[in-house]
Structure formats: structure tokens, C-alpha cells
């Protein structure tokens, strides 16, 4: 592992450097993925640009009535411990607290998790549920990309060679929303998800009437993805157990898992159904706990 | 080409000339000669290289040394104060919570970080704190006993 080290002191300097180096420079946020890939020679980089000196990229900010904004350097540990994230988007806190172990959570960032674009990225399904918006910046300007359109394939995203992920914005969801992320591994820590499923449910006035349902899955396709047809089964419906079963069946049909060292395709399909049902029931229970008139 | 880097380790400053790609673990062991942090897997799986970066446990094998120049680094060598072992170290000795010893320094650093913010952690919190530290002698029972004894005596 050899490289030139770039350490910009502010974000505009980083963008200028990225413009000059393009693909020759890889971005180092936490390093928990990048350094492993470089050491294993799965990736080559002439230069590595550390964002560590850029202080204004590490924040979790509530924008009243609009949502929550995360800087690109927010670590999994920061997100998991944030009362704002825990209260409004518990599925993201749950996902971040299940990444690797403490050492990884203290270094690895939510933004880096997305940019590495592993199909198993734990932070991806929760952010897909929330329709998070990613701000990609370059020396010539910024653009906002819905997370839905961010991933192209394993380790491939729409990030251009001159761009750096700057922020993640999570729009506020009004009403009684409950959500959870469930990760299946063979053990509780230091694990890459065999299957990860997140479900978010928003209730209408009644405890039994679903206004909206969202399902997102990881490790089941080349990219983390929403199960749009599965969601449709539950959306605008009165809750019935058979509907939850059906939504889980349909979600599994939308997945295209592979067989690898961690699990077979068949096992993954079975586990999508199991996790979908469990996550839907938990999301529902959490939504029902929220006060009927409350907006949070 | 080497670059100048100043690291703060266990309260002392070290002015070094190092290659920009060297990891904190390699620099601690080979330049500063603090060999208590161990190199097991070198890719962040085993936790034997755990040190504290601004009080938080991290894998030193996954930190580019030159990027840690503005942080306070604590290694196992910085755990004892004025010649007295840290209570966790004393408990490990007393309970024999060491078999081959390779994982011990990393486990102690993870536990120190836990105790710094929570002086009476639950068993689950202890397990979660050292989930990233592998002991292949499988000596966990005595490690938990040692930790329990620290909680009880405090």
C-alpha cells in the first residue's frame, strides 16, 4: 500500500484537488473500507485525500419542519448515539450500531458507507426508506441526487471523478411513522449482512389503517433497493396479517440474490420473507405507539 | 518521499519523518517502538491493534498515521499511571484473564474507553465493547470475571 497523501484544510480546497487529480485520488473519510481494499490490492490509488482536517463536514443538524442534515464525516457511532436520529429515524441508528464493531463505528462514516456502494452497506436500506437526498459537490457546483438513483452496481455510484459527497439530507416525514432495520448475520458483531431489511410504516388516523409503507433491502441484489411492489401490497390498506405475509412474498420476488460464501440464494430469499414480516410488524408496533394527533 | 509528522502519544510529542502511507500501527511499533499494540490481521478484523484516538477505540492498522497528527493517541503503554497499573490491568493480573496475551492490550484499550464513560457497564455493554476484539484462546470467561471485579470494587 503506497500513495501520496492529500490533506486539504477546507472543503473548497478539497474540491480543487479532486478536480486536479480526478480518479487518481481516492477519498479517505473513515478508512475502514478504503484501507482494507488498498492493502488487499483490490484497489489502486496514486493519491489518497483525507477529509479529516475539514471540520465543517461533521455535523448532525435539525432543519425545523424540513428534516435532518448529516455532514459527510458523521461516523456510524455519531449517528447511532444521536438523540435526533434515535428519535426520528431509529432504523438508521439501528443500522449504524450494527456496523462491524465499536472500532469500525468510531472511524467509518455513513457517507463513506454509501460511496463504497457495497450491496451490503447497512446505512443504505434505512436511507432508502427515507428518500434521503445526497449533495454531490465539485469545483463547478453542487447537485442533489436522490439515494434511489445513487447506486449503479457493486462499488459503483453516479459520483463523477471530480465529485465528493458533501451532505445527506433526510426529509421530515409527518404523521405517525414507525420504522426498523433488521440485519441477519451469523453473529451479532463483525459481520457483513447476509440479508438486511428495513421497513417504514406510516399510519392514517386509525391504528389499523396504513397510509404508506416502504421496504428496503440490502445484500439481495447488485445494489441496495426498495421493494416497490411489496410496498404496494400494504399501502393504503387496513392491516391484516395475510397482507404482511403477501408483502414479504412479493418483496422476495423483487430481489435477485446470489449464492456466495455467506449464504445461498435460496436461503437469502427465505430470509427476506422472514425479515420483511418481522420488520413490518415491528414498524407497525412503533407507529402505533406514536400519539394519534402528534406530528413527530 | 517522507513527510514530517508530529504525533501526540500517551501525552508525549514525537517528531517523525515517515512515508505518507504508513499506518498508525506500524509507526507506533516501528518508529516510536511502542510494541504493546499488536498486529494480528492488519485489516481491522481482530482488534489486537486497538488504541484510543481522542478517547475512542479505533483499529490503528486502519488509520493513516499522518492523519492522526491532531489527535491525542493513547496506547496500552499509557494505561499505567506513575508506575501503578490501571485497575483493569490489576484485575486482569489477579483473575488470570490472559492466556497467550496477544489480544490483551487491545481488549484493555476497548475496556478502558468503556469505563471512561460508564463505570458500571452491564454484561451486554461489556460484550458489545469488546465485540471487535478477538481472543482465539477463547479466554473470555476470565476477562468478564476481571471486569466484574473492577465494577464491584469501584
Image: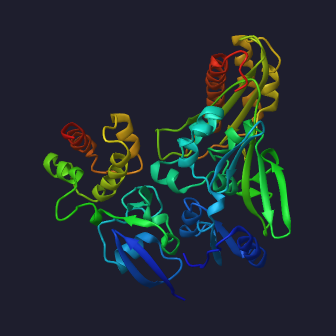
Residue most toward the bottom? B1
> Measured from the top left, where is residue A149 in percent x and y?
82, 48
Q: How is the image coloured?
A: rainbow
Q: Quadrant of the N terminus of chain A?
A: bottom right
> Measured from the top left, where is residue A128 in percent x and y?
74, 40
B63 left or right, relative to A86:
left
> Measured from the top left, where is residue A152 in percent x and y?
79, 53
Residue A51 shows in this picture: yes
Q: Quadrant of the C terminus of chain A?
A: top right
Residue B130 shows in this picture: no
Q: Is residue A264 above or below residue A168?
A: above
Q: Residue at x 75, y 29 (%)?
A: A214
Asked where in the image residue A255 lies, by quadrant, the reply is: top right
A25 left or right, relative to B75:
right
Q: Residue at x 71, y 41 (%)?
A: A127
Q: Is residue B139 above or below residue A234?
A: below
Asked where in the image residue B77 lies, by quadrant, the reply is: bottom left
Give the number of marks.
0
Asked where in the image residue B85 lies, by quadrant, the reply is: bottom left
Q: Looking at this view, is A74 or A150 the one in front?
A: A74
Residue most toward the left? B94
Q: Residue at x 35, y 49 (%)?
A: B116
> Measured from the top left, where is residue B151 in percent x and y?
24, 39
Q: Is residue B127 above or below residue A114?
A: above
Q: Looking at this view, is A32 or A152 the one in front?
A: A32
Residue most toward the front? A64
Q: Residue at x 80, y 44 (%)?
A: A148
Q: Looking at this view, is A111 or A167 the one in front?
A: A167
Q: Is residue B16 above or below residue A286?
A: below
Amino acid at each position: 500500500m503506497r500513495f501520496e497523501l492529500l490533506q486539504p484544510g477546507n472543503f473548497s480546497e478539497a474540491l480543487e484537488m479532486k478536480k486536479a487529480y480526478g480518479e487518481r485520488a481516492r477519498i479517505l473519510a473513515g478508512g475502514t473500507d478504503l484501507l482494507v481494499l488498498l492493502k488487499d490490492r483490490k484497489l489502486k490509488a496514486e493519491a489518497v485525500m483525507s477529509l479529516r482536517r475539514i471540520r465543517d463536514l461533521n455535523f448532525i443538524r435539525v432543519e425545523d419542519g424540513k428534516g435532518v442534515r448529516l455532514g459527510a464525516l458523521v461516523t456510524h457511532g455519531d449517528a447511532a448515539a444521536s438523540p435526533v436520529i434515535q428519535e426520528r429515524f431509529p432504523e438508521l441508528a439501528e443500522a449504524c450500531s450494527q456496523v462491524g464493531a465499536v472500532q469500525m463505528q468510531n472511524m467509518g462514516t455513513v457517507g463513506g458507507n454509501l460511496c463504497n456502494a457495497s450491496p451490503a452497506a447497512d446505512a443504505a436500506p434505512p436511507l432508502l426508506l427515507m428518500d434521503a437526498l445526497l449533495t454531490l459537490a465539485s469545483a463547478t457546483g453542487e447537485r442533489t441526487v436522490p439515494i434511489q438513483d445513487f447506486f449503479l452496481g457493486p462499488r459503483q455510484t453516479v459520483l463523477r471523478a471530480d465529485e465528493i459527497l458533501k451532505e445527506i439530507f433526510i426529509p421530515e416525514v409527518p404523521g405517525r411513522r414507525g420504522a426498523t432495520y433488521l440485519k441477519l448475520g451469523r453473529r451479532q458483531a463483525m459481520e457483513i449482512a447476509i440479508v438486511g431489511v428495513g421497513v417504514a410504516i406510516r399510519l392514517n388516523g386509525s391504528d389499523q389503517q396504513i397510509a404508506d409503507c416502504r421496504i428496503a433491502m440490502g445484500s439481495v441484489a447488485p445494489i441496495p433497493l426498495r421493494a416497490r411492489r411489496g410496498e404496494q401490497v400494504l399501502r393504503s390498506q387496513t392491516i391484516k396479517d395475510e397482507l404482511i405475509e403477501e408483502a414479504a412474498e412479493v418483496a422476495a420476488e423483487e430481489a435477485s440474490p446470489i449464492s456466495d460464501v455467506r449464504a445461498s440464494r435460496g436461503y437469502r430469499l427465505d430470509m427476506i420473507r422472514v425479515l420483511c414480516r418481522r420488520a413490518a410488524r415491528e414498524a407497525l408496533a412503533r407507529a402505533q405507539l406514536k400519539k394519534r394527533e402528534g406530528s413527530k | 518521499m517522507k513527510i514530517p509528522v508530529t504525533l501526540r502519544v500517551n501525552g508525549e510529542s514525537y517528531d517523525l519523518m515517515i512515508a505518507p502511507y504508513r499506518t498508525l500501527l506500524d509507526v507506533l511499533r516501528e518508529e516510536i517502538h511502542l510494541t504493546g499494540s499488536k498486529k494480528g490481521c492488519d485489516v481491522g478484523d481482530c482488534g489486537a491493534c486497538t488504541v484510543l484516538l481522542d478517547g475512542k477505540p479505533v483499529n490503528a492498522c486502519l488509520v493513516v498515521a499522518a492523519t492522526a497528527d491532531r489527535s491525542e493517541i493513547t496506547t496500552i503503554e499509557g494505561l499505567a499511571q506513575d508506575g501503578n497499573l490501571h485497575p483493569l490491568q490489576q484485575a486482569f493480573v489477579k483473575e488470570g484473564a490472559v492466556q497467550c496475551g496477544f489480544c490483551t492490550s487491545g481488549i484493555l484499550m476497548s475496556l478502558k474507553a468503556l469505563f471512561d464513560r460508564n463505570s458500571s457497564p452491564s454484561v451486554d455493554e461489556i460484550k458489545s465493547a469488546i465485540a471487535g476484539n478477538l481472543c482465539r484462546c477463547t479466554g473470555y470467561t476470565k476477562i468478564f470475571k476481571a471486569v466484574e471485579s473492577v465494577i464491584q470494587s469501584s
